[in-house]
Amino acid sequence: MKSKELREKSKVDLGEMKKSLSRDLMDARFRQAMGQIKDKSLMRKLRRDIARVNTILREKQ
């Protein structure tokens, strides 16, 4: 997700997005432990998206 798109969202939307991405990351970790994950870069993408959301939230404070 682009940071430009994130800056247009409200704090509430960003908070919900952060929860959703964190849940997706946890699920990806479980799937990787079970050997079911095909896309090895998925976890890295999710971590970076969470970091972007955190940065934008911090900027809006």
Image (cartoon, grey):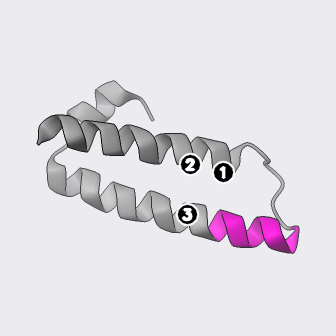
Q: CA distance from mark 2 to mark 3?
A: 8 Å
Residue 17 falls within the magenta-colored stretch? no
Residue 31 falls within the magenta-colored stretch? yes
Q: What residue appears at the point 26 percent right and 37 percent down from the top-left corner?
A: 56
41 over 16 or under it: above or below: above
The residue that label 3 is drawn on is 24
Q: Is residue 52 left or right of residue 48?
A: left
Q: Is residue 20 left or right of residue 5?
A: right
The magenta region covers 27-35
4 over 1 or under it: above or below: above
Q: Position of residue 41 (x, y in %)?
A: 73, 42
Q: State if disc 3 and disc 2 touch (CB < 8 Å).
A: yes
The residue that label 1 is drawn on is 43
Q: Is residue 59 left or right of residue 30?
A: left
Q: What residue appears at the point 84 percent right and 67 percent down from the top-left corner?
A: 36
Label 1 secondary element: helix
Q: CA distance from mark 1 to mark 2?
A: 5 Å
The residue that label 2 is drawn on is 46
Principal SS element in the magenta part? helix
Type of the residue with mark 2:
Leu
Q: What residue appears at the point 15 percent right and 46 percent down from the top-left corner?
A: 10
Q: Position of residue 39 (x, y in %)?
A: 78, 48
Q: Is residue 41 left or right of residue 16?
A: right
Which quadrant is the N terminus positioned in? top left
User: Which tag, 3 or 1, sits closer to the chain's start?
Assistant: 3
Label 2 secondary element: helix
